[in-house]
């Protein structure tokens, strides 16, 4: 089948989080199964600059907010490594410095409604008009709110192209005002609760839910959770209404990019059976060299992630003074995000300079070193649609300590008497989010760390976890082939 992936980011071109990783690894997995997959992204400045040999394969006018945009679709036809990639070039909307979604002050770009509505309309037009007649997609697989209007525009165009809409994170929904709705020249009848109107505004993620042939999210547990008020961000009713049009398919990871056997970012390479213990020690020493932490005998705990409430970074900060008082553990944090968390972390580092190392910023290389060099990985997310970092840490034999939610619940098997006995335990888990329970679980994990035989068993089990894309890619294949149920 011909499948067009539409998304707002993709590694290695542009990435702000796990979505970027998945938009690299999922198409690759489907291509490995023989599908004909292409990817379409907005032509951000950074990406356009790296695609010097791109050629225009289509060009048309797309209505925007009160204006019309001349859109060019580019493709690096000559470059076999990048010829699956198409870029939607609209300089007025995407040729700007910095992050795809926010300006230098960290505020959403004021024209985000127009940017992603025009991108979505352009993708729908490209798919349908397919001026490149030889490649017409059978399915457009859309990801997150930035692409939510694609199924809606295809429906308006009465296109036969099937759509799958994947929710990677319901807490980012692309919610805009009535004024923006009117400016964007969207069909009047969409302004209704059955369509995309939502609590007095309109929602692009809801457009994906309402109009796509199938809706998926990135783990079975999150698919169940978002149908409840606690995790549904007010969409639980809409999602429950989808019935079996909604399913949860667990993300895999790219087993080449995250591979301790070949990883060039880390000091010593290893596999589950070769050099594991000695290499882990070298990787820990190498990581410590880049920090202010002095001791290498103490257990080292890592955290990587966007510094937002979702990730429970406030819970980590809340437990650190007690953790440092009651254990010898040291902690390394790599992250960027809300200023308040960044400042509080730096203040804590000043208070405990030899116990806590904080790196504010984004570093792919340091992320690999942390996964390989730490003894344990902290991921106490309040909610987690799938989560990749816990899988990377499993892959590197660094047991994750997580809250039982979303994809964390589907990938980590917490230590208990039974799971130790049947050798399935690959990490540590707690139920309700809270500082006290996080502290207790961490102290318990440190007790296991002090028992080398059991600890090594957990590390080995972690490395043997099944984390690839194979079975999930096959589930997507099945969805692409399933008949479409009636839509509005
Ligand atoms: P989310 O998509 O919610 O941010 P995931 O766990 O799915 O969470 O994916 C996070 C991805 O982003 C991982 O690839 C992780 O390594 C990466 N990441 C997040 N913050 C940083 C950072 N500051 N430096 C390097 N990589 C980061
Ligand atoms: C989102 C989610 C994360 C998930 C990622 C990739 O950013 O927050 O849990 O792993 O998308 O699907």
Image (spheres, helix red, strand yellow):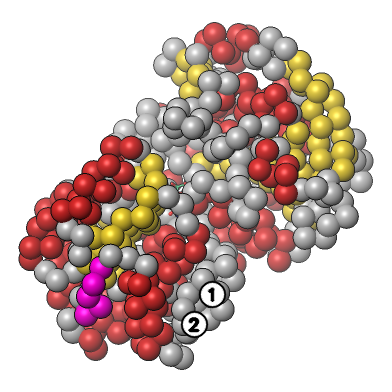
Res 416 visible: no
Circles 2 and 1, Cβ within 8 Å, touching? The answer is yes
Q: What kind of secondary structure does the magenta stretch mostly adopt?
A: loop
Image height of 76 relative to 44, above or below: below
Q: Position of residue 416 (x, y in %)?
A: 21, 72
Q: Is mark 2 within 8 Å of ligand 1?
A: no
Would you name the residue on which mark 1 appears?
A: 263
Answer with mark 2 or mark 1, whichever residue precedes in sequence: 1
Residue 481 among those drawn in magenta: no
Q: CA distance from mark 2 to mark 1?
A: 7 Å
- Residue visible at 70% across and 24% down? 92
Q: Quadrant of the C terminus?
A: top right
Q: Nearer the viewer, residue 484 or 201?
A: 201
Res 252 visible: yes
Query: What span is colored magenta in the figure?
Result: 293-297
Residue 263 location, quadrant: bottom right
Q: Is residue 327 left or right of residue 139?
A: left
Q: Nearer the viewer, residue 380 or 327?
A: 327
Would you name the residue on which mark 2 appears?
A: 269
Q: Residues within 10 Å of mark 1 (few under 14, many from 20)?
A: some
Q: Position of residue 341 (x, y in %)?
A: 28, 42
């Amino acid at each position: 089948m011909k499948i067009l992936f539409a998304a707002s980011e993709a590694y290695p071109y542009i990435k702000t989080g796990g979505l970027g990783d998945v938009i690299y690894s999922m198409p690759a997995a489907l291509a490995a199964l023989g599908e004909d997959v292409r990817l379409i992204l907005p032509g951000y400045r950074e990406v356009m600059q790296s695609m010097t040999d791109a050629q225009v394969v289509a060009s048309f006018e797309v209505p925007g907010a009160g204006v019309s945009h001349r859109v060019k679709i580019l493709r690096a036809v000559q470059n076999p490594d990048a010829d699956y990639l198409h870029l939607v070039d609209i300089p007025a909307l995407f040729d700007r410095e910095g992050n795809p979604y926010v300006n230098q002050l960290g505020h959403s770009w004021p024209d985000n409604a127009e940017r992603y509505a025009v991108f979505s309309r352009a993708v729908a037009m490209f798919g349908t008009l397919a001026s490149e007649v030889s490649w017409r997609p059978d399915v457009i697989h859309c990801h997150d709110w930035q692409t939510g209007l694609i199924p809606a525009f295809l429906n308006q165009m009465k296109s036969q192209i099937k759509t799958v809409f994947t929710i990677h994170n319901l807490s980012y929904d692309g919610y805009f005002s009535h004024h923006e709705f009117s400016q964007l020249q969207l069909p009047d009848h969409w302004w209704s609760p059955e369509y995309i109107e939502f609590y007095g505004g309109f929602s692009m993620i809801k457009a994906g839910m309402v109009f796509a042939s199938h809706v998926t999210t990135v783990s079975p547990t999150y698919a169940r959770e978002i149908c409840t008020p606690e995790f549904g961000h007010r969409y639980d009713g809409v999602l429950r209404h989808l019935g079996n049009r909604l399913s949860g398919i667990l993300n895999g990871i790219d087993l080449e990019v995250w591979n301790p056997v070949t990883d060039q970012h880390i000091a010593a390479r290893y596999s589950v059976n070769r050099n594991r213990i000695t290499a882990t020690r070298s990787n820990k020493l190498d990581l410590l060299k880049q920090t202010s932490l002095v001791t290498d005998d103490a257990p080292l705990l890592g955290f990587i992630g966007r510094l937002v409430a979702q990730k429970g970074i406030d819970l980590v900060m809340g437990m650190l003074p007690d953790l440092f008082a009651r254990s010898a553990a040291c902690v390394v944090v790599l992250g960027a995000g809300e200023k308040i968390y960044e400042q509080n972390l730096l203040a804590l580092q000043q208070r405990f300079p030899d116990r806590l190392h904080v790196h504010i910023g984004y570093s792919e290389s340091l992320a690999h070193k942390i996964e390989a060099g730490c003894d344990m990985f902290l991921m106490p997310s309040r909610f987690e649609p799938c989560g990749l970092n816990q899988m990377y840490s499993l892959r590197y034999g660094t047991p994750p300590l997580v809250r039982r939610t979303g994809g964390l619940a589907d990938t980590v098997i917490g230590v208990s008497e039974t799971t130790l006995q049947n050798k399935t335990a690959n990490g540590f888990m707690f139920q309700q989010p809270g500082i006290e329970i996080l502290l207790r679980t961490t102290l318990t994990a440190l007790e296991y760390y002090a028992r080398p035989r059991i600890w090594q068993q957990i590390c080995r089990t972690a490395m043997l976890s099944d984390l690839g894309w194979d079975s999930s890619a096959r589930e997507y294949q099945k969805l692409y082939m399933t008949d479409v149920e009636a839509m509005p």
